[in-house]
Amino acid sequence: MDINKREQNEFNMAVSYLGRLNNLLYLCDSASMERNADGWFHSLLALSRELSTEMKDDEIEEISKKRTIINNLLHNQNIQYMRTQRMEISNELYNNLNELELFLRNVLKESGLQSKMKDDPINAFGN
């Protein structure tokens, strides 16, 4: 018996996990349509944390780079807001947030979390 091996449970969090992903995608959509850059960004960060177990190392690195760029753009937007008292999302910030969301949605697709089932669901129960 391998002492480093974990016992596997027949129950898992797959349905709950997919529900969280669905909720986060809804929050991303809502924030983007409201042009709420801060809310959109933090929804995308939460989505990236949920997807982190599905990501390859280079994808995690890419997200880290995008996060740094967006953080800087958000910081600049906040400085602009303090000067003008007008909250406007720049095209550059909007495009970077959109690019990050498309990247994460591609991770969903490539991980098989956004695709149709290939087999009849009844086969999943081993009948």
Image (cartoon, rainbow, N blue to C red):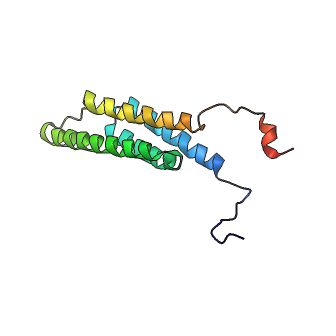
Relative depth, front residue between 110 and 4: 4
Q: Position of residue 114 (x, y in %)?
A: 59, 34
Q: Position of residue 96 (x, y in %)?
A: 32, 33
Name the residue rendered at 20%, 34% in the picture.
86
Q: How many numbered dots are placed on residues in this image?
A: 0
- Please state if 126 lies on the left or on the right of 57 as rendered: right
Q: Is residue 114 above or below residue 50?
A: above
- Please state if 20 lies on the left or on the right of 68 as rendered: right
Name the residue rendered at 72%, 71% in the picture.
1
Name the residue rendered at 40%, 29% in the picture.
33
Quarter of the rendering containing residue 2: bottom right
Q: Position of residue 16 (x, y in %)?
A: 62, 49
Q: Is residue 25 above or below residue 14?
A: above
Residue pushed farthest right?
127
Q: Position of residue 117 (x, y in %)?
A: 69, 33
Quadrant containing the C terminus in the rendered view: top right
Q: Is residue 90 above or below residue 45?
A: above
